[in-house]
Every structure is written in C-alpha cells, then in structure tokens.
Image (cartoon, rainbow, N blue to C red):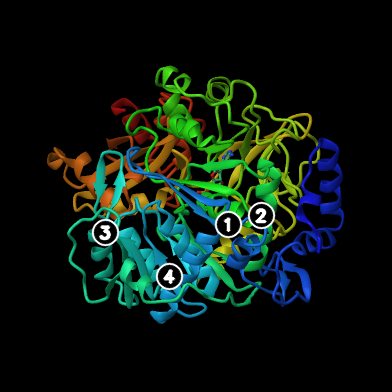
C-alpha cells in the first residue's frame, strides 16, 4: 500500500519535485496518492475528461466509502485519539472530546437511523443545523450509506432553505429545536417549519434537541434522541462508486437561482486529505481548528473530511468570535492548545479593531500554523495576524479556492514554501493555473495581470450543477473553452506567485461570503413600490466588500420606511448576510442601448467617484450619471 505521507512535501525541493511529477504525468501521480486509501474495488481508469462536454471522471469503476476512510481506517492505530473536539457557544458549558472510536459508533448508529427512515443510496438529505457534533455525525452517516447530503448554512432564511430543499428534492430534513449564537437563541425549528410548508418532497424530519425549547412536533418530525435509541451501533460501510455524488452544496451565482454544486466521492476524498496534509503540515498530536461553519465548503473539506481522513483532531466551535467578548478565539486557543488556526480575513479585521489585550491575555504558544480563506487579505490585517496572534513565529497560509474546486488550489505550504503577504502564492501539487488575457490567450510571462483559469482537471472539481448541466457548462467552461474559469482575476509577481485581485463577474465577496447580486436584486424587486434595482460591491474596511443598492421607486412619496422594508425582504428571502450597507433611491439607472445596466459606472459611484466615468456617450441615458452622483 502506498503511503500518502511520502508525497507530502517537507522542503521546497520536495515541493518542486512533486509539483513537476504531478503535472508531467498526472494520472500516474494521482494513482499513487489514491492507493493509500481503502478501496472496496479498484478503479479501471484514473482520469478521463472533456472540457467541452464538460465531463470529468476520476478513479472510475472504483468503489469506496469515505466514512470508512474517515473512521474505520483509524480504529486500529488511534481509536482513543480525539477526532472531534467540540467547544460550545457558552464557555461555561463543558466541552466535548469525541474519540475516533466513539465517533465511529455514533456515525454507525445514525446511519441506521437514516436507513430505518427509508433513506437509501442516492437519496438527498438536507441538513439545517447548528455547529454541533451531530452535524458532522449526520454528514458522515449520509456518506456511509451513500445518501447525498445537502448542508444549508443555518443563517439562511426559510425561503432560501425551501428553495434548496426543493431544488434537490430532499427526502429528509435534519434540524434542531434551535441554536445558540452569542447571547441569542435562534429558532431554527420555526424557520424549518415555514420552509417545509412548500416542500412536499420531505417525508421525515429528524430534530436534534439542542436548546431544550418547548417545541411541538409535527407529524413528520422525530426526535434525534428517540431515533438513535432504537437502532444498533453497527453499520457496515458499503462500497459507493467513485463517481457517485457525495454531496450537493449551494453557492450563489449571477442569476437568481443558487447553484447546487455536486461533488463526487472518490476524487473529493483523495484531494481533501492530500490538500489538507500539504497545506497545514499536520502532525500527530496537533489540534487543528478551522472556525468556518460546516454550512460552507470550508467546513466540508477542512473541518470534516480533510482532517478526519487524515486522522487529525478537528475542533468544532458553535459560537461567535465576540461572545462573551472579543477574546473568545484566543481563549479557546489557549484552553485547547490549538496548533493550527484557520479563519477568514473578515474575522481578523474585526478582531484587530479591538485592543490587543484581548489577545495578549492568553498564552498562544501552542500555535504553529495560521491560515486564511474566503477573500483576499489586506496587508494590514496580515501583519496584525502575523505579529499579534502568531508572534512572528507561525507561517500564514492564504488559501485560494472555491465551493466548486472542493479543495485548496493556490496557497503556500506551511513552513515549506515561501509566504508573501496578500499573495496566495503557488499552486498546490497537481493544480495547473494560468492567467489569460482579454483574448483568452495564456500569458506566459510573470509579473502580469489577467483572469485566472485552470487548464487541467484535478480530482475534486465539482462534476455538475444539480439538475442543470447546461448552466455548469455556461458558467465555468464557455467563456474560455478548454479551461475551467473560476470567475476571479489575478496577477503574478516576478517569481510566479499568484495574487488574487477579486471577482470579475457579478459576485461580491462580503465578509468572506459569496453573494451573487442577482438574487438580492430579485429580493429587492419583490417590494411593491420598487420598479428596478441594481446592486454592486464596494470596498469596506472590515467586510472586505459591502453592498450598495441603487433602487428606482414607483412612487417616491412613499419612501419613508423603504430601506427598512427592503432589508426585511432581503433577510427573509436570503438571510441577514445579504443586507446592503447603503441603499440609494434613484430616478433611473445607467443603461446601454440594449438595456443592460452599466454596473461598471455604478461601482465607481459606490466607491465615491464623482467624475471620471470614461466614455458614457454610448449610454441610452448618459444624463442619469450626474443625477445619481449628485444625490450620492
Ligand atoms: C470565492 C469562492 C474557499 C472557501 C470559501 C469561499 C474568493 C476564496 C480566497 C483567497 C482571495 C479568495 C474568490 C473565490 N476567495 N479564497 N484566499 N484570496 N479570494 O468559497 O463561497 O465558493 O467563494 O471566494 O473570489 O472565487 P466560495
């Protein structure tokens, strides 16, 4: 059996050698990596692909069970090691340490609950849950029986939840009686109930008791604790086809409908463990903490699958960085001797606003590696992270990737390759990024700017958009035929280090959350007094970007509570994260002759630009620009 650790670089020479190997003969390379996993049946073919269809298959014909690789595989050599370390929202509530043996048992038990409730291989199960161990357990239980999990972030509204349940035709919803968040409790159950009114596909709902609220069960509801008491704690993993779907995870795009990105079992498994081990250089005994929510891809790949496949101890935190005060992250780092800490630039910027004493109060000597994800990190935040948190002794990995890529694509490797503030730096082993110019031609020299593209498949590329392969093709493979197009711009320095410059499409990254402008405009347009709206992003000190809405009303005399009403609509259709920072009422929007809104101009106005809009004579209504600027 091959050992994956032999392919994890420990020096820059290793990295150079392995990178070269991985791109010279990718199939040979990935075959060796894949051999270190448990396969119930070996594959026939490492890779086949066609960027035009588009179609990608990895380890086709192979059969595996990812939960077996996450759990059973570790029972021999580390049954008593903590797999999940759970830190509750309330620091006074006792934390939990769940060993690999216990996690295995609890996952098996819940797998039997799924089976008992008629969930079979291929069925979709929606998870709308707080950040508690049962969320990870439910995820792993789905994967153990070949059911497809669709985790919906518990900050989404009932409308957003319903849209995701319906899109995937989920047969089951797993939720909780509520969740704790700072000093608040959130009534998840009512939100779920509201969503289910319009979701007839859901036949059973399993409810976890978390906050002990006095909820009433509906006909289809069953308590988690009752269900697990009725089944055995043994469940043999079944072999799932490598290309069978493992999960669906929604991300927003440039039309109103969220995209259900589908990831498959074999390639995702191989890449999530390999990338985790590479980037973080995790060693036995380390305590790794990623502060993301499992409702996002970061949580899927680098709280649950990557770390557990690697036999790591992974921390799950239920709460928020500001509760009970702004020192909570560092208090947890000290309490659990955290060695690896992975968070979002937004969180760093928010914490850096507060006195350093919130950090210096705690002993952070256990920290070895720091990481960031989700958006570009500015130099000031990077320096604060490096100096105040890392005491200049911890490498910082700035990891660029996406829901669609399944795993980290561009990042430095902790302590192995060079880091450079604001640069994600070098491609991961096996990843082949390029910069393309305006004509879609590859830019071969360093020190240039262009759009980022990937020119060769990697194992964890999303295989399709659930129910809409045409859209998958249009969004990612049509603008630049023969490449995967992620939607980001980038530049390289003279050494070929990549710096991500930001989105080049209608997606805005707000506090690390990927927000398509179209669905938010749709929500605003639901207001009876709104004719039309346009949303753009602008730079924001803490959030990275914030949203600016330009709104045309039918009747300007009825504008008293308009901002409040619009915000309420957005919260209820999408969620509070999508609320704009600024709403400006305007008499018209700058449009091209074909009727397209010129967002480029609105973006400039949102940034405070007064003139300098370039040639606006081709607009249908050039005069509107000055009117909007004057009222800004
Ligand atoms: C978009 C993907 C990756 C998991 C969390 C977000 C932006 C992500 C970085 C980074 C600059 C980044 C990109 C990307 N992004 N990481 N290190 N530097 N930008 O996943 O919601 O699918 O969003 O986030 O714009 O395309 P996502």
Residue 80, image x and y in percent? 57, 54
* Mark sitting on residue 125: 4
Residue that mark 1 sits on: 305
- 135 lies above or below 197: above
Q: Are marks 1 and 3 in contact (CB under 8 Å)?
A: no
441 and 323: which is toward the camera = 323
Which of the 4 quarters of the picture holds residue 12?
Answer: top right
Q: Does label 1 or label 2 sit earlier along the sequence? A: 2
**Callout 1: SS:** helix
Horizontal arrangement in the rendering, residue 225 relative to residue 378 (left or right): left
Q: Are marks 1 and 2 in contact (CB under 8 Å)?
A: yes
Sort mark 1 into few (<14), some (14-19) or many (20+) by Cα contacts within 10 Å.
Answer: many
Q: CA distance from mark 3 to mark 4?
A: 18 Å
Query: Does the image show residue 332?
Result: yes
* Comparing labels 4 and 2, the label whose residue is closer to the camera: 2
Residue 442, image x and y in percent? 76, 46
Q: Does label 4 or label 2 sit earlier along the sequence? A: 4
Horizontal arrangement in the rendering, residue 131 relative to residue 33 (left or right): left
Residue 149, image x and y in percent? 47, 66
Residue that mark 3 sits on: 177
Is ligand 1 closer than 8 angstroms to the Cβ of mark 1? no
Quadrant including the N terminus: bottom right
* Comparing labels 1 and 4, the label whose residue is closer to the camera: 1
Query: Does the image show residue 260?
Result: no
Q: CA distance from mark 1 to mark 4?
A: 18 Å
Q: Does label 1 or label 3 sit earlier along the sequence? A: 3
Q: Does label 3 or label 2 sit earlier along the sequence? A: 3
Taking the spot 19% from the left edge, 45% from the top edge, the residue there is: 565
Sort mark 3 into few (<14), some (14-19) or many (20+) by Cα contacts within 10 Å.
Answer: many
551 and 93: which is toward the camera = 93
């Amino acid at each position: 059996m091959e050992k994956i650790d032999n392919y994890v670089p420990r020096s820059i020479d290793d990295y150079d050698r392995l990178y070269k190997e991985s791109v010279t003969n990718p199939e040979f390379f990935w075959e060796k990596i894949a051999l270190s996993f448990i396969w119930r049946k070996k594959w026939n073919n490492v890779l086949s692909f066609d960027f035009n269809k588009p179609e990608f298959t990895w380890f086709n014909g192979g059969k595996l069970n990812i939960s077996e690789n996450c759990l059973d595989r570790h029972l021999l050599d580390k049954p008593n090691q903590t797999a999940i370390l759970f830190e509750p929202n309330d620091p006074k509530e006792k934390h939990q340490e769940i060993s690999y043996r216990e996690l295995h048992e609890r996952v098996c038990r819940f797998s039997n609950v799924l089976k008992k409730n008629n969930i079979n291989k291929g069925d979709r199960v929606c998870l709308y849950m707080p950040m508690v161990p049962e969320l990870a357990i439910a995820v792993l239980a789905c994967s153990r029986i070949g059911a497809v999990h669709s985790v919906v972030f518990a900050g989404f509204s009932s409308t957003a939840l319903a849209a995701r349940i319906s899109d995937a035709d989920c047969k089951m919803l797993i939720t909780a009686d509520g969740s704790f968040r700072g000093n608040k409790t959130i009534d998840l159950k009512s939100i779920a109930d509201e969503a289910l009114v319009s979701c007839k596909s859901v036949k059973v709902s399993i409810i976890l008791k978390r906050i002990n609220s006095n909820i009433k069960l509906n006909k289809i509801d069953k308590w988690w604790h009752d269900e697990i008491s009725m089944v055995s704690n043994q469940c043999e993993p079944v072999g799932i086809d490598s290309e069978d779907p493992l999960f669906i995870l929604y991300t927003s795009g440039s039309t109103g409908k969220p995209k259900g990105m589908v990831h498959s079992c074999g390639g995702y498994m191989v890449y999530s463990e390999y990338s985790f081990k590479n980037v973080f250089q995790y060693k036995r005994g380390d305590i790794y903490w990623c502060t993301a929510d499992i409702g996002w891809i970061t949580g899927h790949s680098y709280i649950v699958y990557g770390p557990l496949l690697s036999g790591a101890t992974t921390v799950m935190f239920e709460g928020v960085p500001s509760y009970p005060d702004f020192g909570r992250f560092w208090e947890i780092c000290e309490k659990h001797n955290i060695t690896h800490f992975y968070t979002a630039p937004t969180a760093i910027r928010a914490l850096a606003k507060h006195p350093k004493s919130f950090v210096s109060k705690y002993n952070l000597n256990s920290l070895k590696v720091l990481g960031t994800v989700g958006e570009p990190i500015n130099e000031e935040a990077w320096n604060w992270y490096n100096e105040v948190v890392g005491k200049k002794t911890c490498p910082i990995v700035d990891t660029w990737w996406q829901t669609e890529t399944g795993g980290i694509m561009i990042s430095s490797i902790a302590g192995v390759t060079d880091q450079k503030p604001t640069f994600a730096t070098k491609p991961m082993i096996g990843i082949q990024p390029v910069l393309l110019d305006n004509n879609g031609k590859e830019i071969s020299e360093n020190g240039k700017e262009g759009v980022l593209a990937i020119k060769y498949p990697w194992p964890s590329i999303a295989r399709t958009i659930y129910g809409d392969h045409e859209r998958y093709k249009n969004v990612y493979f049509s603008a630049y035929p023969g490449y995967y197009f992620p939607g980001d711009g980038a530049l390289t320095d003279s050494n070929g280090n990549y710096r991500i410059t930001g989105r080049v499409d209608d997606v805005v990254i707000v506090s690390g959350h990927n927000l398509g402008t179209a669905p938010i405009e749709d929500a605003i347009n639901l207001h009876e007094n709104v004719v039309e709206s346009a949303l753009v992003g602008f730079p924001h000190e803490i959030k990275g970007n914030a949203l600016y809405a330009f709104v045309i009303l039918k009747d300007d005399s009825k504008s008293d509570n308009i901002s409040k009403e619009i915000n309420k609509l957005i919260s209820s259709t999408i969620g509070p994260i999508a609320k704009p920072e600024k709403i400006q009422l305007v008499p018209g929007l700058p449009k091209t002759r074909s009727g397209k809104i010129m967002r480029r101009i609105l973006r400039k106005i949102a940034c405070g630009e007064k003139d300098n809009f370039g040639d606006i004579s081709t607009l249908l209504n050039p005069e509107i620009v000055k009117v909007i600027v004057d009222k800004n």
